[in-house]
Image (cartoon, helix red, strand yellow):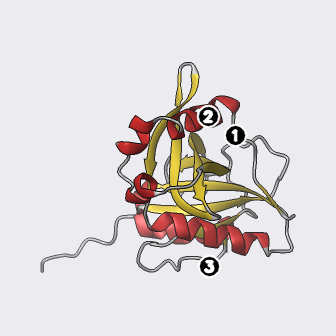
Amino acid sequence: MPLHVPSAPAPALRSVLAALGSPTAVREARTSALRSVQGPLSPELPLPVHVLDRIAGDGTTPLTHLAAWRFLIRSEGRAIAAADTMRTPDGWAFSHFFEGPYLASTELALGQAEASATSYQARLLSIPELYMLTLWLHGDTGADASGGVLAPADVLVPLAPAPPGIAAHRPHRVADLLPVMTLRVSPGPLLSSA
């Protein structure tokens, strides 16, 4: 299996299981699929969610920080929602359930990565400056999933919907995509009013 999905911290998993077992949390979730499902629900494929702190055009290594653990909530073999956890002073706690286009896009990208001949550690990378979420395929499968250094050979797969000009589900090496992202967030030339 070339795709390594890291183990989530036990408190993160416990908090999601507790939320799934809470009729109040499920009933109040803003996910119609979660409220209407009849069968059992299971949290699967825990992915660390990193946030890119800032895209810099100065050649420095971009740093990220671990912001959440995301679980796909499955029922009858398909993802119907996701659950995020958040870091607290006491560890990890359930944050919220959600649904939307990133669910199917994440599953598609994970399936594509699984078919790859190269082994990767799966992570998610949020790039707030571009309103973009990517599947981050980290080359060191044994790395601590909370580590936040993007290696130039790591692969980023933009999830749909991707920003204009960046194709969703097309894998890019970090070294190739980072200059494109830098151009996207750099201020353009000022137009003179002559």
Q: Is residue 178 visible?
A: no
Q: Position of residue 74 (x, y in %)?
A: 60, 57
Amino acid type shown at disc 3 = Arg
Query: Which residue lies most toward the front here?
Result: 38
Tag 2 secondary structure: helix
Q: Where is residue 79 in the image (x, y as percent from the top left)?
A: 57, 62
Say if mark 1 contacts mark 2, CB within 8 Å.
yes
Characterize the local packing of mark 1: few (<14), some (14-19) or many (20 or more) Cα atoms within 10 angstroms: some
For the point 53% across and 19% down, the residue is: 89
Query: Which residue lies most toward the top here?
Result: 90
Query: Which residue lies most toward the left here?
Result: 194
Q: In this view, does 69 lie to the left or right of 34?
A: right
Which one is in front in this view, the residue at disc 2 or the one at disc 3? 2
Characterize the local packing of mark 3: few (<14), some (14-19) or many (20 or more) Cα atoms within 10 angstroms: few
Residue placed under numbered mark 1 in the picture: 8
Residue placed under numbered mark 2 in the picture: 12
Tag 1 secondary structure: loop
Please identify the quadrant where the N terminus is shown.
bottom right
Along the viewing direction, whichever of 144 and 112 lies nearer the viewer: 112
Q: Position of residue 119 (x, y in %)?
A: 85, 63
> Mark 2 to mark 3: distance in Å?
30 Å
Please identify the quadrant where the C terminus is shown.
bottom left
> Mark 1 to mark 2: distance in Å?
7 Å
Task: Check residue 170 in the rendering and tell me which mark sits there, or answer none.
Answer: 3
Task: Check residue 183 in the rendering and tell me which mark sits there, or answer none.
Answer: none
**Which label's residue is closer to the chain start, 3 or 1?**
1
**Which label's residue is closer to the chain start, 2 or 3?**
2
Amino acid type shown at disc 1 = Ala
Amino acid type shown at disc 2 = Ala
For the point 35% across and 65% down, the residue is: 187
